[in-house]
Amino acid sequence: MNDNTDFHLLKSLKNKAFLMGISLWLIATFFYFLFVHKGLNVSPIAIDGLNSLLTIYMPVLVLAVFLLLYLTRKREEVNWAELYAVKKSSAKKEAWLSLIYLIITQLILGAGFNMGLHFPGTDIYSTGSHSQVDVWVWAITYTIIYTILPLIWLKRRGFSLKKLFGSFKWIRDLWIIIVYWAIDFFGPILVGSADFFGGISVSQYAQGVPLGILVNSLGAGLPVVVMMHIIFIPRIAVLLESRLLVVLFGGLFYSIFSLFDQGVDYSTLSTGLTSFTYIIMTQTLVGMGKATFTVVTGNPFIHFITLHIISARVPFDTRMYIEIFKLK
């Protein structure tokens, strides 16, 4: 690691913003285990949190954050201001606005309509429990609120998708895409957390995989790309000197996006507390992994392939979409 990287890392660890961010994660983690120890009712998503943290989420932190930051430590800094049309004078205000917008809309969609970042919201899917209409309502709603409206806002501030696409270095980043896609795609299958193989025909795979990618792109993938990777990350990146700081706050931002994921339960105080603290504890680490791909490449679509829609969501969701859309 070069001297400049060492300096920024040391400075990050002493930075008040870093201490605040890591404290939020540590507090949520502490209280999750305290609630479990005290015997509070645990929501379905938060069962066996220690095992999940150690076997799933800590490896994400090590491999997708620390290892990738180290392997790309000599890369030139991304020109966030130029590529993402960010003005340093207004970056802080716009970052806060994006966070407030996300919190308000998540509370409305999640608490009011049971819509989360991933279908079917807080519900645990079972055969026949949800319809095709449910899928499209979710996908279209999230597309409008988190993709179309934010892109209109960005365009008025001089942001150009064409200019951004022209800056991508796909060949340089190909090794990142291949290695991390393979880990995130095959990992859930190998550990048995995704039911992807068996009982599905070739025809169903041929229809279900692209259909799942399409609806998940509309409802989850593109909203995260736009809100987190095109709006939030570039704005905090022009304000902070350290990549690690940007990654940390990107992770916390993503955890807000995940508050109404499948299996959370806010119907009682006890399950609500275990749901909230579990999501912050685990999804901050996932979000840090996603943020790292953008921070080291400048490409907000890399994580879409390596740690989201085209990787783990395929084995997780294909069977569900085959059943919902009755694919033969």
Image (cartoon, helix red, strand yellow):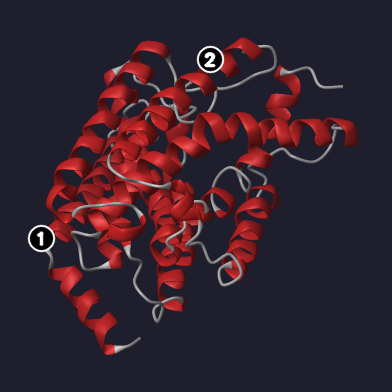
Pointer 1: what residue? 16
What x and y, as percent, mark residue 222? 49, 38
Q: CA distance from mark 1 to mark 2?
A: 42 Å
In the figure, residue 309 lies in which quadrant? top right
Where the C terminus falls, by quadrant? top right
Pointer 2: what residue? 137
Circle number at residue 183: none
Q: Residues within 10 Å of mark 2 (few under 14, many from 20)?
A: few
Contact between marks 1 and 2 (CB within 8 A): the answer is: no
Q: In what element is the residue under mark 2? A: helix
What x and y, as percent, mark residue 25? 26, 49
The vertical placement of 39 against 71, above or below, is above
Q: Earlier in the sequence, mark 1 or mark 2?
A: 1
**Residue that appears at 68% across and 26% down:** 320
In the figure, residue 215 lies in which quadrant? top right
Q: Nearer the viewer, residue 111 or 240?
A: 240
